[in-house]
Amino acid sequence: MAEKVPFKELAEISGVIGAVRWQPTHLGKTVAPPRLIEFIGDIKKDRAERLMAHAEAGGLALFGIGQLSYHRSPDDNTVVYPIDAYYAHGQYTSVVATINRVAILIDNEVNVDVQALSKKMILVEN
């Protein structure tokens, strides 16, 4: 098994503006407001909560798409499933979020290896 990555290590990556980790408030098949666990970097609590909420909503949508794609063609090895991370590119900043409920806000002025970043993020214990 891969070694866990401490959440605070994510702030040391060049280009990372801030990061959040959160948990659901209710386990099961309901959609409930997420609960912020911690945030790091150059963001305030309000920005951390918005990053968390947007990442949670995007993650739920992508998880649903992955499920539909998998159930439509479970033997197709080109299906992007299971989904463990997603990337949303913005004009000035971008977001990488992982299925273990960790999200990072990155500065588009800095060249960041999104695949390596995702692999590190999914190793954060949450």
Image (tube, rainbow, N blue to C red):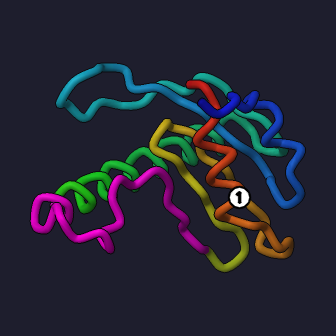
Magenta residues span 68-89
- 46 in relation to 75, above or below: above
Relative horizontal placement of residue 48, taking residue 32 as reference (left or right): right
Local SS, label 1: helix
Q: Quadrant of the N terminus?
A: top right
Residue 83 forms part of the magenta stretch: yes
Q: Quadrant of the C terminus?
A: top right
Question: What residue lies at 19% left-to-right and 30% top-to-bottom?
Answer: 30
Q: Which residue lies under the disc numbered 1?
A: 116
Relative horizontal placement of residue 58, taking residue 89 as reference (left or right): left
- 86 in relation to 91, above or below: above
Question: What residue lies at 46% left-to-right and 50% top-to-bottom?
Answer: 84
In percent of width and height, residue 83 lies at: 39, 55
Amino acid at circle 1: Ala
- 19 in relation to 34, above or below: below
Would you call the spot at circle 1 few (<14 residues within 10 Å), some (14-19), or many (20 or more)? Answer: few
Quadrant of res 93: bottom right
Residue 122 forms part of the magenta stretch: no
Q: Nearer the viewer, residue 110 or 117?
A: 117
In percent of width and height, residue 34 lies at: 42, 30
Residue, far bottom:
91
